[in-house]
Amino acid sequence: MAERGRGGSLTGTRIRERRNLVGMRQAELARRAGISASYLNLIEHNRRRIGGKLLLSLAEALGVEPSALSEGAEAALLAQLRQAAADRPEAGADLERIEEFVGRFPGWAQLVAQQGQRLGALQQAVEALTDRLTHDPHLAASLHEVLSTVTAIHASAEILVAEKELEPEWRDRFNRNIREDSARLAEGARRLVEELDEGETSEAAIASPQDQVEGFLSDHGFHFPALEGGAEDGAVEALLSTAGERLGSGAARLMARRVLDRYAREAAALPVSAVIEALPEGVVLDPAALGARFGVDAGRMMRRLATLPADRLAEKGQAPLGLVACDASGTLTFRKPLDRFPLPRFGAACPLWPLFQALSRPMMPIAGKIRLAGRSEGVFVTHAIAQPVGAPVANRDPTFEAHMLIQPGRAEDPVDLPRVGVTCRICPKADCRGRREPSIMAESGG
């Protein structure tokens, strides 16, 4: 096998392209650099490492700075192309020649990478829209109203056409009905377009209280400095007063107040600096072990970890964390998405998530690794637990709440990890024991 330069370097490709640009023969460049033409040929095909004095000699002979040969902006481009190839293995991309492709045709390589990213973004948009069309009660009501109005107009029009001897009074009545229904149809269509619009104003207008609260939390990155380090009296109300239309209903403000009150209590018990100091360097976090260290339960520790700012996590080599919670019915009550692990907006999540497995084993921490079906890069480490809500009461069964912390996994993790989806409607996994409804995505054996 050919010996690649360190880190898959394109130095040899840059040397060859520069030599061709200045019109120099390979033998001439080899002579000026004091090496054989055959050795230079290996270098130019990235089959021999190069550095130090030889790199300086070649750069001098070609009339460029050494950095122009040893460095470049191809690293990110190579990563994007490899990701595009992994997302679509059926295309059969020749990964062995990917560096040559980038080196010889950087413009085309950039175009391919951009198209790969665009396809990924479009797929996420389709998934989000499908989720809304399937589960959004507001959107379903608007669609039902439009269809009902169209049916009413059609029925009135058929009567007018079929009944040639209709009394003038009844004809006027049917015409009036058509006019009123047409106005109602126009208004319903307008609202439907607004609800499909991704604009912030229309989103706030149709969002449920939970959506409004999660939008408010997302605006702040799920982190509130004003509530850290012993929040002053009135700090929660001050935050709510700045929310404006984001918390446009009384129910949303009540729910947000509960979330912020709990945040303030947990921030006081688990200061940011102390938690960051306790985190291990660049390894997978164990919320149960961290919670025991601070004398708190795993669920509380998960919530606290999910609110840590990204820059502080980066100090310990940790990536941002995702979190999802549900009540005893399995309804999602909290969502903090993680990059490449989208969460369904209107419930109906994948029943194979460890989050729901935890409900069947209360108080037992469940840790493991999973992959998202249909996504080669989707490797995640999850920790889940179901715990009672509130203090125990004699002769009363507890009500449970489950949490699941989501952390990015490693690319080298096994490929045979359990596969889960986001929601059945857009999951490509074949022969799934937990499927509730057929998927609109092509079956791929996930």
Image (cartoon, rainbow, N blue to C red):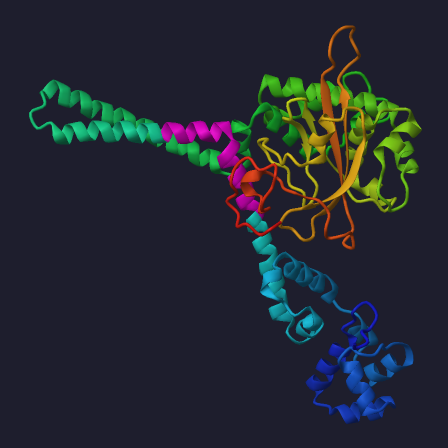
The location of residue 430, given as percent across then percent down, is: 58, 46
Residue 36 point in image, percent of width and height = 84, 91
Is 137 contained in the magenta span?
Answer: yes
Secondary structure predominantly adopted by residues drawn in magenta: helix
Give left or right: position of 196 versus 378. Answer: left
- Res. 324 visible in picture: no
Q: Is residue 90 above or below residue 96?
A: above
* In this picture, residue 140 sits left or right of residue 391: left
* Residue located at (62% from left, 40% from top): 422
Question: In the image, is residue 395 above or below residue 33?
Answer: above
Q: Position of residue 140 (x, y in %)?
A: 45, 30
**Residue furthest to the left:** 165
Q: Is residue 25 visible?
A: yes
Magenta span contains residue 116: no
Does 204 appear above or below 409?
Answer: above
Residue at 38% over, 33% down: 189
Residue range highlighted in magenta? 124-146
Note whether 189 is above or below 410 in the view shown.
above
